[in-house]
Amino acid sequence: MAVIHHTTMSPTKLELLAGWLPARSWYVRTRSAPELSRAGGFRIDDPAGEVGIEFMVVTDTSGDRPIAYHVPLTYRGAPLDGAEEGLVGTSEHGVLGRRWIYDGVHDPVLVAQLLALLQGKAEAQHQSLSDTPDPSVAAHFTGPALPEPAAARAVVDGPDGTRLAVEPAEGGPLALTVSRVLRAQGPGTAGDSAAQAGTRAHLTAGWTAPDGAERRGLFAVLRAADAG
């Protein structure tokens, strides 16, 4: 299990994200710089114990209404070859030293563990506690298991999320869509946007709004590539 170090990072994650977010195609532009706060998230362990994996939710209150963003991140002790496009920045960790922080959709370790989580082969972990599962993160999977190793490529950002092609896959190509702008869903609606034809899996989790209200929504969907 990954060990969570309660220490300093310089610059902080929020400082790095404040400079990185405005350049994303899915960022909702406001009249001023992002004003970010932590809103929730969870982690997944890297089986090799080398890469930190976090699915972070931050809220931006710089506009007329708060916007919650889902930002999967990986933390590495050295640069990841070929992932320069996904580099968020570097930070000095109080225990581990310099860390290279990546937008996780560009990191094969995070993508592999997300696919494992969707299939029930990995377990979500608490965001800030070591060796503590997070049962509030719910994965729903149907259809045949993905052949191993399953991998993703062709990372494409859109207005609401990031789409990755998944291969190999039985029954034809699949697309993994990672939500970026989170939308709260009420009771009984958590799977509505995931219930389209061709859906193989979806992942829901929660976060906390600035007013303290608990929200829940769709974090990722795996469906047939031709299902939209």
Image (cartoon, helix red, strand yellow):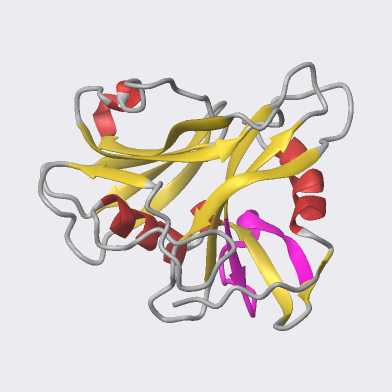
Q: Quadrant of residue 60?
A: top right
User: What residue is drawn where x is 50% and y is 76%?
Assistant: 2
Q: Is residue 204 left or right of residue 28?
A: left
Work out whether residue 225 or residue 212 is closer to the camera in this orientation and state it. 212
Q: Position of residue 51 (x, y in %)?
A: 52, 74
The stretch drawn in magenta includes residue 84 = yes
User: What residue is drawn where x is 77% and y is 51%?
Assistant: 14
Work out whether residue 226 or residue 51 is closer to the camera in this orientation and state it. 51
Quarter of the rendering occupied by the N terminus:
bottom left
On screen, residue 169 above or below 208: below
Q: Position of residue 169 (x, y in %)?
A: 18, 50
- Numbered range of the magenta stretch: 73-91
| The residue positioned farthest toward the front in the image shown | 212
Q: Position of residue 90 (x, y in %)?
A: 76, 67
User: What residue is drawn where x is 87% and y is 34%?
Assistant: 33
Q: Quadrant of residue 124?
A: bottom left
Quarter of the rendering occupied by the C terminus:
top left
